Image (cartoon, rainbow, N blue to C red):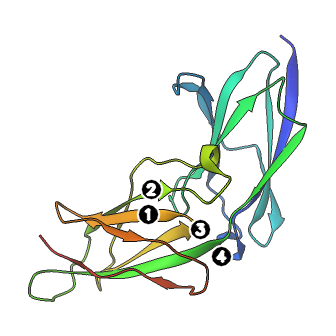
């Protein structure tokens, strides 16, 4: 089987320096997984930049999903057709940390609350590079939850069955305050 090697440059921002749990998952054209997640493909280039070196069959058509086990950034999904992709590609993430305190109806912080969020609109010109799958984070003992947000995107954030709050980080504030989500 003939193969080709593709190198992707991922700039996840300085707050993502030293990640040890990065993964790449090939996806078939029908979005099913192709093989197992790849953890050995990454080289830390410093300051939150990484190189991902993938070897694939020259007949592969689909996509690649970049993510990390700790889920500290929105997964990146890029179209990947072995015969069409330049030998190297890059994507740069301008991100901010979003934060909120989850409270019950009496105003008390809720520890261990699951906050859900989803990218509604990706940054201009990057539509195929982002996942719109819902993600989740849990609040800490003080009710604080933090979410990595891509600048220029819009998100909806919700707690339980509560109404979603729409946010749009523009990069002017980091960390970025998310309106408090009141309990159910």
Marks 3/4: CA–CA distance: 18 Å
Q: Which residue lies furthest to the left in this view?
A: 106
Alpha-carbon distance for marks 2 and 1?
A: 5 Å
Q: Name the residue nearer the viewer: 11 or 177.
A: 177
Q: Residue 155 carries which label?
A: 1
User: On the image, numbered disc 4 is attached to which residue?
Assistant: 15
The residue closer to the viewer here, 93 or 154, is 154
Q: Earlier in the sequence, mark 2 or mark 1?
A: 2
Q: Distance between the residues labelled 2 and 4?
A: 23 Å
Helix, strand or loop status at disc 2:
strand
Q: What element carries label 4?
A: helix
Mark 4 vs 1: CB contact within 8 A:
no
Query: In the image shown, does 34 or 107 lie closer to the viewer?
Result: 107
Q: Which residue is drawn at 60% across and 23% down?
A: 28
State the residue position of label 3. 152
Residue occupying the point 60% across, 70% down: 151
Q: In which quarter of the image is the N terminus?
A: top right
| Earlier residue among tags 3 and 4 | 4
Compared to 78, does 20 lie above or below? Answer: below
Q: Earlier in the sequence, mark 2 or mark 3?
A: 2
Residue on which the image places disc 2:
120
Helix, strand or loop at mark 3: loop
Of tags 2 and 4, which is closer to the observer?
A: 2
- The residue at 47%/57% (across/down) is 119
Q: In this view, does 42 lie to the left or right of 133?
A: right
- Closest to the camera, between mark 4 and mark 1, is 1
Looking at the picture, does residue 46 appear above or below residue 140? above
């Amino acid at each position: 089987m003939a193969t080709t090697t593709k190198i992707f440059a991922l700039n996840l921002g300085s707050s993502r320096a030293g990640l040890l749990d990065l993964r790449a998952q090939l996806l078939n054209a029908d979005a099913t997984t192709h093989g197992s997640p790849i953890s050995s493909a990454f080289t830390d280039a410093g300051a939150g930049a990484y190189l991902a070196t993938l070897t694939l069959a020259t007949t592969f058509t689909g996509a690649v999903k970049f993510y990390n086990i700790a889920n500290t950034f929105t997964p990146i999904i890029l179209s990947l057709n072995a015969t069409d992709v330049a030998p190297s590609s890059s994507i740069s993430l301008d991100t901010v940390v979003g934060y909120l305190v989850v409270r019950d109806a009496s105003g008390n912080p809720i520890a261990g609350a699951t906050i859900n969020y989803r990218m509604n609109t990706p940054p201009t010109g990057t539509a195929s590079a982002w996942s719109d799958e819902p993600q989740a984070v849990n609040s800490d003992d003080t009710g604080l939850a933090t979410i990595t947000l891509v600048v220029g995107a819009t998100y909806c954030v919700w707690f339980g069955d509560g109404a979603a709050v729409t946010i749009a980080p523009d990069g002017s504030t980091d960390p970025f305050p998310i309106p408090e989500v009141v309990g159910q």
